[in-house]
Amino acid sequence: MNYTIKELHTSNISKNLVYEALKTSLPFSKQFIKNKRVFDENDFEIFKYYKQFWENKTVSKFWTVDKIRDNKETQKQFTNSFETQKTVFENSIKTVPSNNQKELNKDIETVIKQFEDREVQYKESIEQKEKLIEVKNEQVNKYALLKQEEKKEKEEWIKKHDVLQNEKGEWMNKFYNTRMYMILFFILFLISSFWIVILLIK
């Protein structure tokens, strides 16, 4: 099923969220029907996850795996293309007259060397990107762990605070009860003293 931006909006995916998510490198499909951008079920899942967890977790879940796969597929296509063109060059040697053989061999070796150099550069670029992805994933995981630790410390602090408040409440109750007893004792003492004085006077 395909979704337009309007249909996403009716599914509680706002236009602002769609535009914000499209600015990232998430693996959204690039489909257009009658010059209108449409999204598939996988895109819909990404939008729902993005709405709940925002960019870091969404990229960690959806983007990295697809990018690594795409890079490996591209590398495979590049290697296959290189092997195909190499075979074509090698086959063409057999059909060339002998007087041009050395010059052609030299040109072919140059072209093959260029392809090999490009392949090495491309592989290095892919390795660097994969390392960057690993570092980013590590940072996301560390951030998540820090958030969990922070939440745990906050919960422990709240528990300690509640315990102290309960102890304070109990102490205040004891204090007021003791004060009440002292006031009652003092009143009784005054009444008794008053009656004793009256009796002595009589």
Image (spheres, rainbow, N blue to C red):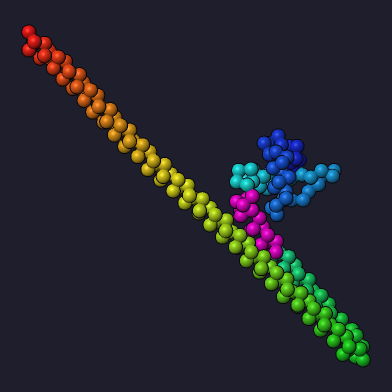
Along the line of sight, the residue nearer the viewer: 172 or 27: 172
**Residue at 44% in and 48% down:** 153
Q: Which stretch appears magenta?
A: 55-71
Residue 195 in sight here? yes
Main secondary structure found in the magenta portion = helix
**Residue at 53% in and 52% down:** 144
Q: Position of residue 58 (x, y in %)?
A: 63, 50
Residue 111 within the segment the image draws in magenta:
no
| Above/below status of 86 relative to 179 | below
Q: Position of residue 183 (x, y in %)?
A: 23, 23
Along the line of sight, the residue nearer the viewer: 122 or 105: 122
| Above/below status of 123 relative to 5 | below
**Residue at 70% in and 34% down:** 10
Residue 76 in sight here? no
Residue 60 within the segment the image draws in magenta:
yes
Q: Quadrant of residue 198?
A: top left
Along the line of sight, the residue nearer the viewer: 161 or 195: 195
Placement of the C terminus among the 4 image quadrants: top left
In the picture as drawn, the residue positioned furthest to the top comes out as 202
> Relative to residue 157, is residue 13 drawn left or right?
right
Placement of the N terminus among the 4 image quadrants: top right
Q: Position of residue 24 (x, y in %)?
A: 70, 52
| Above/below status of 102 relative to 26 | below
